Amino acid sequence: MKKEDKALVIEHIGETLKEYAHFYLVDVTGMNAAATSQLRRKCFGADIKMMVVKNTLLHKAFEAAEIDYSPLYDVLKGTTAVFFCNTANVPAKLIKEVGKEGVPTLKAAYAEEGFYVGADQLETLCAIKSKNELIAEVVSLLQSPAKNVVSALQSAGQTIHGVLKTLGERPE
């Protein structure tokens, strides 16, 4: 590969790092063409951008980035695929689903502005809630007390109305 081509690839990787909020470094060693193609289809369906890169070029893109990605340098060995996404837990769930045969395996991840290094972090990454999941949870928690108050007021209104009606119909 020519030096100019390498510079373009490094620039493309850097732009992609800026475009997506989260990324996973995945070891795809041992995957044949059919398995890789199937993995790419699943990534596309889950709104994940999959990119197989040379470790040296990815390392240079990390060095050129504004964020310090130095905790990830040690895992840049072997065949590396990068899963880019905007929802932190989606790639982890995909890796868990597809990786039942042992391939692909998680090397490291940058999710929710934190570094997760090692395959043992997969369960932690699966448990991360997305922004939409957190918003839905907060809204449901906020609605619960309000629903109780509204329900109590409605039942109290019926009770008061019944008492007043009974008192109004009662002869003096």
Image (spheres, helix red, strand yellow):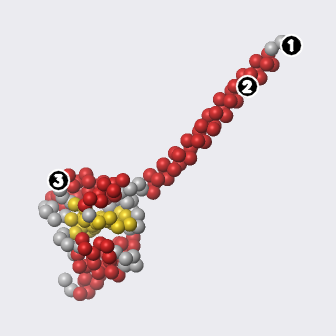
**Residue 53 picture location, percent across and down:** 23, 73
Which residue does the numbered mark 3 point to in the structure image?
101
Q: Amino acid at mark 1?
A: Glu
Kindly report the distance in space between the C-alpha atoms of the residues bearing marks 3 and 2: 66 Å
Which residue is depicted at the point 32% across and 61% down?
A: 48
Relative to 170, say whether 149 is above or below.
below
Is the residue under label 1 in contact with that under label 2 (CB below 8 Å)?
no
Which residue does the numbered mark 1 point to in the structure image?
172
Kindly report the distance in space between the C-alpha atoms of the residues bearing marks 3 and 1: 85 Å
**Is 62 placed left or right of 39 in the picture?**
right
Quadrant in the picture for residue 28: bottom left
The quarter of the picture where the C terminus appears is: top right
Q: Residue furthest bottom?
A: 3
Q: Secondary structure at mark 1?
A: loop
Relative to 158, say whether 59 is above or below.
below
Which residue does the numbered mark 2 point to in the structure image?
161
Give the number of the disc on residue 98: none
Kindly report the distance in space between the C-alpha atoms of the residues bearing marks 2 and 1: 19 Å
Q: Residue furthest right?
A: 172
In the image, which is nearer the foreground, mark 2 or mark 1? 1
Lower position in the chain sequence, tag 3 or tag 1? 3
Q: Secondary structure at mark 2?
A: helix
Q: Residues within 10 Å of mark 1 (few under 14, many from 20)?
A: few
